[in-house]
Image (spheres, helix red, strand yellow):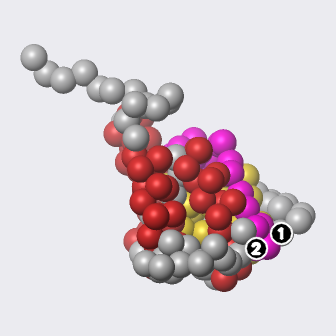
Amino acid sequence: MQVKDVMRRPPVFCSPEANLADAAQLLFKNACGCLPVVGESGHVIGMITDRDICVALGTKNARPTELCVWEAMQHKLFTCSPEDSIHCILKTIRSNKIRRLPVVDRTGLLQGILCLDDIVQRAQPNADKHEISFEDIVQTFRAITRRDSPGFVRRPTAA
């Protein structure tokens, strides 16, 4: 199975200059948790999630119309292509603890978005090696939710 068999099209996206209120409205209107951020050239330059918006608003003490997507978005970008194998992409998802990837063509132009939720919907109990198995999904969720891995910061508890 390839990414193109599972990805969502057409993708909803925003520009880095859009304000957080507009980005939040797009997320709400389209019932999604993230938006690819597309620059002037049409290339994906980052991702912004509903969590990114909440954290930015909670830490910068500003109105959503006063902050732009560029200030809140994730600048570290992972992408995939429509021809990539879902099994290879699941490895990327596991190792980077991400749930969504923009799907780009060879030139970096946005083609769709791949969401772990959509991959889960395609899982089968007795899948062959070309399909997505329940075990693939369990391994992926275990990897992205592990709290003892590098990068996880345990918040101190109140005394």
Residue 127 percent across, percent down from the top left:
53, 78
Q: Neighbour class for label 2 at 10 Å: few (<14), some, many (≥20)?
A: many
Q: Which residue is mark 2?
A: 82
Q: Which residue is mark 1?
A: 105
Instruction: Please report the bounds of the magenta region as a residue range.
Output: 67-84
Residue closer to the observer: 152 or 16 = 152
Q: Are marks 1 and 2 in contact (CB under 8 Å)?
A: yes
Identity of the residue drawn at 29% across and 26% down: 155
In the rendered image, is residue 4 in sight?
A: yes
Identity of the residue drawn at 73% across and 62% down: 80
In the rendered image, is residue 68 in sight?
A: no
Identity of the residue drawn at 64% across and 52% down: 92
Q: Secondary structure at mark 1?
A: loop
Residue 57 percent across, percent down from the top left:
39, 43
Q: Amino acid at mark 2?
A: Pro
Q: Is residue 61 magenta?
A: no
Q: Is residue 80 magenta?
A: yes
Residue closer to the observer: 83 or 53 = 83
Tell whether 88 sits left or right of 123: right
Q: Neighbour class for label 1 at 10 Å: few (<14), some, many (≥20)?
A: some
Res. 21 image quadrant = bottom left
Identity of the residue drawn at 60% across and 69% down: 114
Q: CA distance from mark 1 to mark 2?
A: 7 Å
Q: Main secondary structure of the magenta part?
A: loop
Identify the image quadrant of the C terminus.
top left
Residue 118 percent across, percent down from the top left:
50, 75
Q: Amino acid at mark 1?
A: Asp
Q: Give the label on residue 96, or none.
A: none
Give the farthest residue toward the left. 159
